Amino acid sequence: MSRAATRRRKQRQAGFTLLELLIALSITTAVVALVFAGFGVIGRTEERNQRLIDRAERMLVTSQWLGRKMDTLRQLSLQVNGVFVSFFSGNAAGAMWVAPLPERGEDGGLYVFRATPLRHEDGTVDLSMEVLPYSGELMVLDWGRAEKAVLLHDVRTLQWHYQDGKTGQWTQQWDSSTQRYPARVKIELADAQGDWPTLVFALLGAR
């Protein structure tokens, strides 16, 4: 065998052909693309999981807060034109009741709560809570002086229901003139991500 042929044979054994290099680059590119795609999926999955966690936390905080206020609801009456009526009323959009605010410390006491939808100019709706100090059966409910706070932002569905403890029937209108409290309160909520589990609160002692 000639020296030239031997040299060409050694060069082919020591290096790569252009075709082999192109194939290797194509494989490397595909692997890198798959890796980055995998990172994208992981990132989207983490973002979705975080949204689910945030939503579950909002559900828990909202249901616990409302549950505490319903559990400690006081069955009081007020006098209107000489007639005593229950200090509770509600409709499909919200309700009004009396409960304590012990978290205020020395300033704690009984307060009138009113849950109501707060509508914004951009069309969004929040679940708002308004609070007034309870000063007795003859108090004037001046909601312009109430403290206000948003319990839940961007509510898509908000429906309140009240169960009559005598008949077991549900209604979306509960007048204070009923002279008794509902046995249960049910709230249907939905946000931008869909429906919430239905919230149901039993009013202790209300029958």
Image: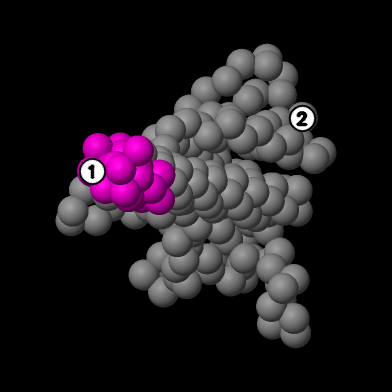
Q: Is residue 155 visible?
A: no
Is 122 rendered above or below residue 142?
above
In the image as oriented, which residue stretches furthest toward the bottom?
A: 106
Query: x, y (%) of residue 53?
Result: 58, 49
- What residue span does the magenta drawing correspond to? 1-26
Question: Which mark identifies residue 207?
Answer: 2
Earlier sequence position, callout 1 versus callout 2: 1
Q: Residues within 10 Å of mark 2 (few under 14, many from 20)?
A: few
Task: Assign a secondary structure to mark 2.
Answer: loop
Give residue 97's position: percent from left, percent from top.
60, 51
Query: Foreground: 123 or 15?
Result: 15
- Residue on which disc 1 sits: 18
Residue 129 in sight in this render: yes
178 lies left or right of 103: left
Identify the residue at horizontal 65%, vertical 33% (top origin): 200
Label 1 or label 2, whichever lies nearer to me, is: 1
The magenta stretch spans residue 18:
yes
What is the secondary structure assignment of the residue under circle 1?
helix
Give the CA separation, mark 1 to mark 2: 88 Å
Q: Position of residue 166 (x, y in %)?
A: 72, 19
Callout 2 amino acid: Arg
The structure's colour scheme is one colour
Taking the image as shown, residue 120 lies to the left or right of residue 49, namely left
